[in-house]
Image (cartoon, coloured by chain):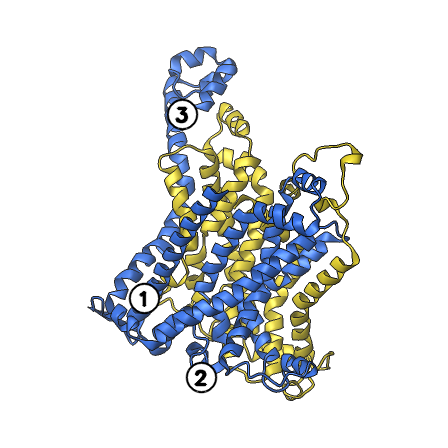
Chain colours: A yellow, B blue
């Protein structure tokens, strides 16, 4: 991954061993205290998730008793079943997959195109437009939802998936992310060489830009999928329990749609599971992507 | 243009490379399959057009969608904030002037929401960033399985606001709640996390802290790894111990990153919405029985979609935007002063 090359100091000067002083910063190996404190942090990070599974395997009555359950009970599959059917988590998972999948593909594609233009092509107002893109990253989603709601109800689109897909098809972050990556990862000579061979812009994009951008596209895809899967404000305004995404279904659970706490926990577990699996499979890439975005930003 | 420079270096292929070259002259230089003159000039014109138009074509999808669903709505929200727009009768919008804003400024609930947003913002952001800084420092040591540690710290980020809040609400429940049970062992009586003022605000903040500490730690870690090792070596030669190195090398080097995370967290805190909504359960949009954790984002949702006054909701949204702009200006002044002092 380019991430590690970026994050680590480029060229570590090879110095005389005797000059390397004990206590000099980062090459220190971690001691037992470091591991201990890190383990506490890790426990705090993971415990609520593990406990979600514990609670989802119990009954509503048991969860109201003291002391709270600390180990798994026998009701996990019953509760998952109830969450899937009664709380609509089945439909919700399907809808969220469609929504987050579409948004991810579109965001990665459009961000790569725009990021490439900003990184390597000269055109009028390019710096102004780039500044506009960066500046608008701080606008809260609240500033858009009233007009969006009015338009969507005018079109008769409320409770339909395109309502939550369309407004999120691109992100300013994605464009900026791809631009920052391509500035250094795509050699200008490569584009020029393709031009010399008479390649059209589309061919340049297909044969030069996409191959060079692939690692960043994968990372942006993962980050976008997480973001789209977890998006909350606009989906709960635009959709309801009749045709929910995962977050809409969880919102319904939280406001008493199904009063059984064990089933609610089963729903929370189900709704988080796809992303947890993604983190287990691609954790390294996601971590790399966040760190890479940070270095550039 | 750089491409014509390239073409000079490779005269053999100049015909297709340099759009400015007259087609006739170019054809003579070209060896293989020379196209007829008409097609050639058509091709070179197409090529020139392609060079000029393609950047705009590449940014068009982004700006069309972004403009239509983010920038234009921003202006429409301002327009609606000057109108009386009711959820029950969306098609009749009457001019209201500044009434919605006046209404806000004289509403106790607005000021309460503003105060709560600020309080929750501070008690969620400050401990979060401090913990992230410490965590990043630890992750920056040579660790066994460093990737696994990083992924573990980031797992809360995979949990959605909704899922996390549902779990934490149960953990914070009055009876049978895990947290009150733990407190009981330390000899602290049960805390009413739902109803008490500071208790509920702390509980809501803790969800934010849990979800974002690892994320911010990774951002600090990335910045820490970019600090040149020589700085530490010379500090150590000067006799600086580890804490002094952290204080006098790491922190100053991280200053831009810290500023960045403060800005991002402030933006996040200003629009805080999902956590208090779901923490409140059935009456979530009120932010508790006494509105004790109703934030601006929640107040907007409550006024717009529960009460049904979309004009007022628009005015609240624009107030949030203005607050962010003020924060941005303060931040800019602060950064400038910081730069001068360095």
Instruction: State whether discs 2 and 3 lie on one chain.
Output: yes
Q: Residues within 10 Å of mark 2 (few under 14, many from 20)?
A: some
Q: Of circles 1 and 2, which is in front? A: 2
Q: Position of residue B241 (x, y in %)?
A: 71, 49
The first of marks 1 and 3 along the sequence is 3
Element class at badge 3: helix
Estimate the x, y position of residue A9 in percent, counting from the top left: 65, 39
Q: Which mark is residue B109?
A: none
Q: Residue furthest front?
A: B239
Q: Is A225 located above or below residue A11 in the figure?
A: below
* Precedes in sequence: disc 1 or disc 2: 2
* Horizontal arrangement in the rendering, residue B136 relative to residue A196 (left or right): right
Q: Is residue B104 left or right of residue A52?
A: left
Q: Which residue is mark 3?
A: B43
In depth, the one of B218 and B12 nearer the eye is B218
Mark nearer the viewer, 2 or 3: 2
Q: Which residue is under mark 1?
A: B314
Where residue A117 appears, as percent x and y from the top left, is: 45, 38
Closer to viewer: mark 1 or mark 3: 1
- The answer to whether residue A290 of the structure is visible from this angle is yes
Quarter of the figure with the N terminus of chain B: top left
From what the image shows, is residue A92 above or below residue A255?
Answer: above
Element on which disc 1 rests: helix
The chain identifier of the residue carrying mark 1 reads: B
N-terminal-most mark, 2 or 3:
3
The CA distance from mark 1 to mark 3 is 52 Å
The chain under label 2 reads B
Q: Residues within 10 Å of mark 3 (few under 14, many from 20)?
A: some
Mark 1–mark 2 Cα distance, whole angstroms, equals 24 Å
Q: Which residue is mark 2?
A: B289
Q: Residue at x 37, y 30 (%)?
A: B49
């Amino acid at each position: 991954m380019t991430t590690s090359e970026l994050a680590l100091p480029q060229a570590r000067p090879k110095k005389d061993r005797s000059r390397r002083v004990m206590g000099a910063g980062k090459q220190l190996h971690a001691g037992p205290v470091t591991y201990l404190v890190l383990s506490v942090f890790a426990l705090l990070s993971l415990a609520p998730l593990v406990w979600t599974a514990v609670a989802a395997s119990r009954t509503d009555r048991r969860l109201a008793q003291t002391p709270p359950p600390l180990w798994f009970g026998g009701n996990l599959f019953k509760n998952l079943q109830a969450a899937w059917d009664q709380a609509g988590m089945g439909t919700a998972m399907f809808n969220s997959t469609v929504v987050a999948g579409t948004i991810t593909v579109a965001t990665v594609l459009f961000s790569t195109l725009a990021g490439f233009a900003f990184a390597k092509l000269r055109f009028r107002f390019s710096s102004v437009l780039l500044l506009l893109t960066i500046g608008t990253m701080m606008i809260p989603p609240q500033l858009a939802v009233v007009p969006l709601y009015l338009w969507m109800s005018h079109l008769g689109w409320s409770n339909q998936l395109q309502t939550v897909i369309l407004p999120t098809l691109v992100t300013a972050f994605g464009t900026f992310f791809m631009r920052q990556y391509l500035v250094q990862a795509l050699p200008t000579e490569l584009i020029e060489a393709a031009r010399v061979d008479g390649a059209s812009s589309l061919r340049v994009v297909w044969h030069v830009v996409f191959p060079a951008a692939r690692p960043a596209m994968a990372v942006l895809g993962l980050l976008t999928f997480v973001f789209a899967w977890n998006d909350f404000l606009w989906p709960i305004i635009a959709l309801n329990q009749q045709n929910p995404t995962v977050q809409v279904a969880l919102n319904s659970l939280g406001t008493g749609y199904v009063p059984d706490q064990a089933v609610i926990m089963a729903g929370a577990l189900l709704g988080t599971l796809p992303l947890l699996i993604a983190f287990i499979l691609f954790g390294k890439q996601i971590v790399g992507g966040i760190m890479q975005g940070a270095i550039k930003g | 243009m750089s491409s014509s420079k390239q073409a000079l270096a490779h005269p053999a292929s100049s015909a297709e490379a340099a759009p400015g070259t007259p087609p006739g002259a170019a054809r003579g230089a070209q060896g293989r399959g020379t196209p007829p003159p008409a097609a050639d000039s058509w091709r070179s014109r197409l090529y020139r057009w392609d060079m000029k138009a393609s950047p705009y074509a590449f940014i068009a999808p982004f700006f069309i969608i972004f403009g239509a669903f983010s920038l234009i709505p921003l202006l429409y929200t301002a327009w609606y904030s000057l109108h009386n727009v009711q959820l029950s009768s969306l098609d009749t919008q009457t001019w209201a002037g500044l009434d919605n804003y006046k209404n806000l400024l004289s509403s106790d609930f607005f000021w309460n929401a503003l105060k709560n947003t600020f309080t929750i913002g501070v008690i969620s952001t400050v401990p979060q960033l401090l913990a992230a800084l410490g965590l990043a420092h630890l992750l920056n040591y040579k660790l066994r399985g460093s990737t696994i540690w990083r992924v573990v710290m980031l797992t809360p980020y995979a949990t959605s606001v909704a899922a996390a809040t549902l779990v934490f609400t149960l953990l914070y429940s009055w009876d049978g709640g895990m947290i009150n049970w733990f407190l009981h062992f330390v000899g602290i009586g049960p805390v009413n996390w739902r109803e008490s003022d500071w208790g509920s605000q702390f509980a809501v903040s803790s969800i934010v802290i849990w979800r974002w500490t690892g994320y911010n730690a990774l951002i600090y870690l990335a910045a820490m790894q970019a600090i040149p090792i020589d700085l530490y070596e010379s500090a150590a030669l000067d006799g600086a111990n580890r804490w002094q190195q952290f204080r006098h090398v790491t922190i100053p080097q991280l200053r831009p990153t810290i500023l960045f995370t403060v800005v991002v967290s402030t933006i996040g805190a200003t629009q805080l919405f999902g956590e208090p909504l779901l923490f409140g359960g059935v009456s979530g949009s009120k932010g508790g029985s006494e509105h004790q954790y109703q934030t601006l984002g929640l107040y907007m949702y409550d006024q717009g979609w529960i009460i049904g006054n979309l004009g007022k909701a628009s005015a609240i949204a624009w107030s949030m935007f203005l607050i962010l702009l003020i924060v941005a200006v303060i931040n800019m002044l602060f950064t400038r002063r910081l730069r001068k002092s360095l």
